[in-house]
Image: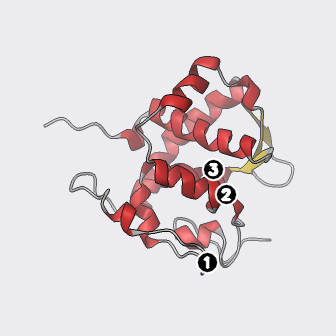
Amino acid sequence: MLLYDWTKDPHHTLLRISIILKILHEKGIKEIEYDRLRILDFILAKPTIITEMVFDKNWRGNKSTFKNLKHGYNSFPKEILFHQMKDIFDIVINSLEKLTVIVSDMSISPRYNIKIENLSINLQAVIETQQSINFDAITLIKNHLIDYPLLGRGGLKDRSTLMEYKYDNH
C-alpha cells in the first residue's frame, strides 16, 4: 500500500509555512525566529501534538478536537518526526529566502524578516482556499500560540517539548 506523507512533502511544507507567515502579517508581526517557525510548522503538520501541550488557564479550547485526528500509520514519536522534517523544512526556507519572502537576520539569533508581499499571487490564492490543513490548528496558532514567548519555561519550546529550552538565553 502506498501512503502519502504530507510531513515530508515540500509543497505541503511551503503551504504550511506560507499560512504561518500570513498569520504573522495579519497580526502585524514582521519577523519570526527559525525555531518558532519550525515548531508552528510541526503543529500544522501534526495537530495531534496539541493534545500533549500545556496551555494557560485562560485557554478555553478543547483538546479532544485534536485527539480525533490520530491515525494508525506514520505514528513515529513526535521528536523523531520533528527531526525527520527538518531537511525538507530547510529546503523550503531556502527557497523562500531566494524569493525574498523571508529575509534572514542572523545578527541576534536565527530569525527572518517577513516580506509577505513577495509571496506569489497563486500561492496566496491557494492559502485562501486550502482545506488540507486543520482549521482549528490554524485558529489556535493565530489566537494563542503566536503570542507565547519562544524561550524559557512556559515558552513554545517548553510547551511543545519538541526542543530543549532550559539553557536558552532570554
Quarter of image, res 144:
bottom right
The answer to whether mark 1 and mark 2 are in CB contact below 8 A is no
Q: Earlier in the sequence, mark 3 or mark 2?
A: 3
Q: Residue at x 62, y 66 (%)?
A: 156
- Residue picked out by circle 2: 146
In three-dimensional space, the C-alpha distance between marks 1 and 2, rounded to whole angstroms, equals 14 Å
| Kind of residue sitting beneath label 3 | Leu
Give percent across and percent down for residue 28: 80, 46
- Residue picked out by circle 1: 56
Residue 31 vertical position relative to residue 124 in the rendered view, above or below: below
Q: State the quadrant of the C terminus.
A: bottom right
Task: Find numbered disc 1 in the image and state the secondary structure of the residue it sits on.
Answer: loop
- Residue picked out by circle 3: 37
Give percent across and percent down for residue 84: 43, 49
Front one among 30 and 106: 30
| Kind of residue sitting beneath label 1 | Asp
Give percent across and percent down for residue 7: 41, 44
Residue 98 vertical position relative to residue 42 in the rendered view, above or below: above
Q: Mark yes or no: residue 39 visible.
A: no
Alpha-carbon neighbours of circle 2 within 10 Å: few (<14), some, or many (≥20)? many
Q: State the quadrant of the N terminus.
A: top left
